[in-house]
Amino acid sequence: MNPGLVIATHNRHKLDEIRDILAARIPNFDSSALRCAADFRVPEPVEDGADFAQNALIKARALSDALGVPALADDSGLCVDILGGAPGIFSARWCGVHGDDAANLALLLAQLADVKPPLRGAHFMCTAVLAFPGRESVSCVGKLFGTLRSAPAGTGGFGYDPIFQPEGCRHTLAELSAEEKNRISHRAQAFRRMARILTEKLPRLSGRS
C-alpha cells in the first residue's frame, strides 16, 4: 500500500513524536498512512540551503520527487540574539562535527561566557515544509523564545535544551518532561499548524478517501 504521507527523517523517535502531534490535531487520524524515509531506499539530499526553510524544502522536495508522494520535512535550530542568529542552521554542527551535542553546547557556552543575562536572549525555530509531486509546497513556522543559562541544568531533551529557559518558565527544556516540552516546543508549534493544512490537502490521513 502506498503511504499517504512520508516524513523526511530516518529517526523513528522523531516519527513517533510527529505522529503523536498530528494525531492530536487530525480527527480520526489514520497512522497507517504515515511513513518515514527510513522505510524506503532513497538517497539523502545535501542540505545546502541558506536558512531553515530552504533546507526543509530540499529534504521534502527530494523525498517527494523520489517516491512520487507527498513528503513532509522540517529543519530547526537555535538562534542567539547577540550572535546575530547563530548558530542557526549550523546548530547541529556548531563545533565542526555534526551531532556532537556536548561539544556544540560547550563551544556556545564559551562564546557567551562574558555575556550578561539581559543580553542572553535566544529562540528555537522550526520550519516544516510539505511538498507534493508536481512542485507544489507549503510551509509552517514555529518559534520558542527564551534565554540561555550560563550552565547546563536537567538531563532530558538533547542539543541545547540544558541551557535554554523558555519565556515564562522557571526551568530549562532539559528539566521538563517530554510531554511538557512537546506542548510548547518550536517543532510542536510548526506541526500543529501543519496539521490543519494536512487535513485539507490529504483527507486520507483522517480516514477519508
Image: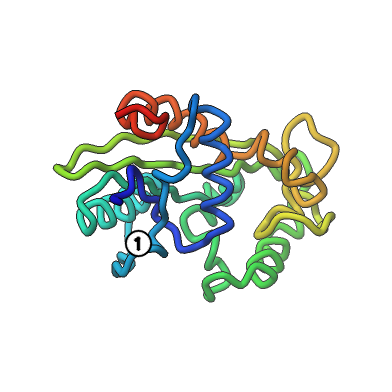
| Number of marks drawn | 1
The C terminus appears in which quarter of the rendering? top left
Judged left or right of residue 138, residue 92 is right
Q: Residue shown at 52%/31% (left/top)? A: 192
Residue 5 locus on image (x, y percent): 35, 44
- Label 1 residue SS: loop
**Residue 147 drawn at (x, y percent):** 72, 42
Judge whether 195 appears above or below 177 on screen.
above
Q: Residues within 10 Å of mark 1 (few under 14, many from 20)?
A: some
Q: Nearer the viewer, residue 158 or 147?
A: 158
Foreground residue, 3 or 98?
Answer: 3
Side of 193 relative to 101 (left or right):
left
Q: Residue at x 51, y 35 (%)?
A: 22
Which residue is located at x 66 percent, y 62 percent? 108
Point out the residue furthest to the left here: 134
Task: Find residue 208 and report its horizontal and vertical position in percent.
Answer: 35, 27
Q: Position of residue 188 (x, y in %)?
A: 57, 37
Amino acid at the residue labelled 1: Glu
Q: Is residue 88 above or below residue 135?
A: below
Q: Which residue is mark 1?
A: 47
Q: What scheme was used to colour the molecule?
A: rainbow
